[in-house]
């Protein structure tokens, strides 16, 4: 079984923020009428994507504690690290760009760092979603917790669509092919 983890923060006040782009991709993968099962630390939904069983997961532990939700789920469902995909925002990528990686560090993304710490490994795939670099801002936390402005929403919607295609492609074709096609 696969587990696709979208990072974000729970609650309506965070729904449209840059930090919640991982949740948006999970919602797009699940479809408009999807119902998620609630647990104390996460929401998840079983699905079939590209013919394979997958869990679509949104941790509810807030971004910086995502590992507290992900590690028990990985254990409960015996998810291999190669079958885990984490979707996270990235301020180091231009707005709208996506980057697929087989493994690596957290790049300063605290939710990703929490998962790496909780799993004791960084050897799992991740799809980073470019939210743009805050120009002239000292407080990056404020930047990532703000909604996308109106003039960026079309780019964000297109990025979410490409991310959904990338996830499906990763499942069907594997990580090397996904990197070759979507990292351009």
Image (cartoon, helix red, strand yellow):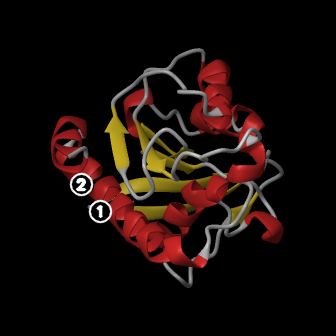
State the SS at label 2.
helix
Q: Quadrant of residue 166?
A: bottom left
The residue under label 1 is: 165
- Where does residue 75 sit, x and y in percent of width and height? 61, 30
* Mark 2 vs 1: CB contact within 8 A: yes
Label 2, label 1: how far apart the Cα atoms are: 6 Å
- Where does residue 163 sit, x and y in percent of width and height? 37, 58
Left or right: residue 103 compared with residue 149: left
Q: In this view, does 101 lie above or below 25?
A: above
Q: Residue 182 carries which label?
A: none
* Camera-side residue of 39 and 95: 95
One can see residue 63 in this view: yes
Q: Quadrant of residue 27?
A: bottom right
Q: Which residue is drawn at 39% across and 55% down?
A: 53
User: How busy is the neighbourhood of tag 1: few (under 14 within 10 Å), some, or many (20 plus)?
Assistant: some
Q: Which residue is drawn at 74% across and 38% down?
A: 138
Among all residues in the image, which is located at the extreme bottom?
33
The residue under label 2 is: 169
Q: In which quarter of the image is residue 124?
A: top left
């Amino acid at each position: 079984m696969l587990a696709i983890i979208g990072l974000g923060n729970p609650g309506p006040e965070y729904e449209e923020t840059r930090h919640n782009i991982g949740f948006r991709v999970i919602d797009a993968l699940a479809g408009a009428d999807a119902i998620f099962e609630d647990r104390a630390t996460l929401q998840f939904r079983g699905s079939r994507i590209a013919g394979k069983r997958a869990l679509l997961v949104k941790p509810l532990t807030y971004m910086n504690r995502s590992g507290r939700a992900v590690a028990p789920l990985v254990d409960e469902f015996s998810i291999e690290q190669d079958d885990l995909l984490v979707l996270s925002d990235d301020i180091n990528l231009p707005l709208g760009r996506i980057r697929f990686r087989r493994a690596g560090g957290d790049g300063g993304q605290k939710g990703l760092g929490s998962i790496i710490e909780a799993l004791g490994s960084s050897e799992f795939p991740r799809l980073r979603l470019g939210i743009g670099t805050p120009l002239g801002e000292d407080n990056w936390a404020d930047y990532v917790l703000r909604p996308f402005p109106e003039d960026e929403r079309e780019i964000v919607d297109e990025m979410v669509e490409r991310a959904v295609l990338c996830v499906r492609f990763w499942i069907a074709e594997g990580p090397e092919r996904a990197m070759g096609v979507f990292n351009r």
